[in-house]
Image: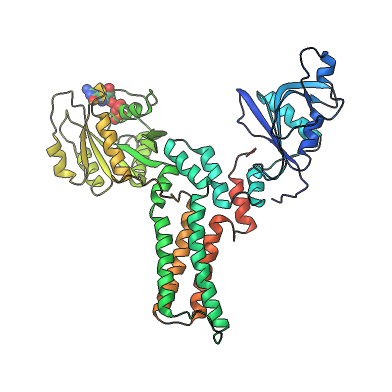
Amino acid sequence: MMTQPERTIAAISTAYGESGIGIVRMSGPSAKAIASRIFVPYRGSNASQNQKQSPTEAFAFVPRHLHYGHIVDPKTAETVDEVLCVFMKAPHTYTGEDLVEIQCHGSTASLRRILSVCLENGAEMAERGEFTKLAFLNGRIDLAQAEAVIDVIKAKTDKSLETAVSQMQGKLSEKVKAVRQQLLDLLVLLTVNMDYPDEDIEVATYGKIEESLEAIRSGISALLENADEGKILREGLSVAIVGKPNVGKSSLMNLFLGEHRSIVTDIPGTTRDTIEEQISLRGIPLRLTDTAGIRETSDVVEAIGVDRSKDAFNKADLVLLLLDSSRPLSEDDISLMKAAEGKPCIAVLNKTDLAPCVSEVDVKEYLKTAQIISTSLLNDEGIEQLKDAMEALITGGKVRREEDILVSNTRHIQLLKNALGEVNEALSMTRAGEAMDFLEVNANAAFQYLGEITGDTASGEIIDEVFARFCLGK
Ligand code: GDP
């Protein structure tokens, strides 16, 4: 995707569907001229209708002023919609170019018509993420900040929004750049010692190189350390609800969802398939999977569901294993408990409102590692305790420090790992006293990898790939 400087792009920037207002955005050198041609300002209630809506002369925008008027198709003189229009002058705009935003009514028809009037008058249809790409190409933001824009748009919970905003403000980039600067200093030191060994310069001793490589390594490790938590915030954590039929899996799912999403019945085996739902548990996004009853079965339809359950069980980050406290533990319960041993799991001993048959001590006998929470889903009892336990398990009981920068992007995690690999390699070569040319190669590779995070060394293809993840109009 090439972005030529002479291009003026336009797109609908708000979501499709019915809404109070919608925005069509134009960026580029002709944005103002096009807007002047199609926007007719309101000249007061005393002006005649004709005067109000005739696109006779080009309108002179005052930068950053909100102008009230109409979009009028210059070709047909037809009024498209009543709008508010703002012109922002380059370079202090989102894209770094002249930018026009037309706020119209949020119907698909109005937005489409206004966009097509823009296109007919010289604008070109923007590609996915092109507005943000321009911001990147014009040096307003770096690649990691641009990626954070997508995360901000897609954020579903307070915590993931907070992380994305911090990255958008350049907090991650600052850290990466600091480590990169240390690498650059090292590279300079190595290069001058290799190229000008006789000059009166700082001597690169192996001890000194090792020291700076270690500092670099801990910098990268610190960023990687919170990568897992960042990934959770971004993608959500997968939680599988498992248990034999009729223990209350659907009831639990419904309680989490706050609505009757899956069917609750008295007939064992009615949840035939797995159902995945997104919820927010105190700001942490969770992907909940309600599984069909896991048990040996000859029923073909149910067998498919059982396979999926086992799959979900193995893949889940956290398993909620449901047991019925009013009935003796069955073979199925026991085999599930055995399978859950050692995994991140919470045993939910349900139906405590009925006459007890199984106690927490009985469960402990088979499942030593899991925490046990007693509930009566029917009476809404034990739910908060269950949520507390889930939260504690997910955040590992540690409260995130405010200044922590979360590495939430899979792309960034991979690049950090690559960089760490190169630094480790350079370190072991330094310790073995290998020639400086060799370790320079690894240090340089690490420098390149880190540069890909911020976009300093990213290829055109990588950049295109990043922006292809955007929605149109951003
Ligand atoms: P699933 O087959 O594991 O999904 O179980 P369901 O959620 O469909 O529940 C099976 C039956 O148990 C339903 O009739 C529920 O109303 C009932 N049930 C669920 N939780 C409780 C509980 O805590 N106490 C009692 N008495 N019944 C419950």
The foreground one among 277 and 130 is: 130
For the question of whether residue 440 can be seen, the reply is yes
Quarter of the image for residue 259 reads top left
Q: Residue 213, position in %: x, y?
A: 43, 70
Q: Name the residue: 13% across, 34% down.
A: 359
Residue positioned 53% across, 68% down in the render: 184
Q: Seen in the image, is 281 located left or right of residue 76?
A: left
On-image quarter of the C terminus: top right
Residue 353 coordinates in the image, percent (x, y): 18, 23
Residue 212 sits above or below residue 23 on the image: below
Q: Indicate which quadrant contains ligand 1.
A: top left
Query: In the displayed structure, does residue 114 sit left or right of residue 378?
Result: right
Pick whichever, 335 or 178, lies toward us. 178
In the image shown, does 215 or 123 lie closer to the viewer? 215
Q: Residue furthest right?
A: 56
Q: Is residue 421 left or right of residue 115?
A: left
Q: Nearer the viewer, residue 116 or 68?
A: 68
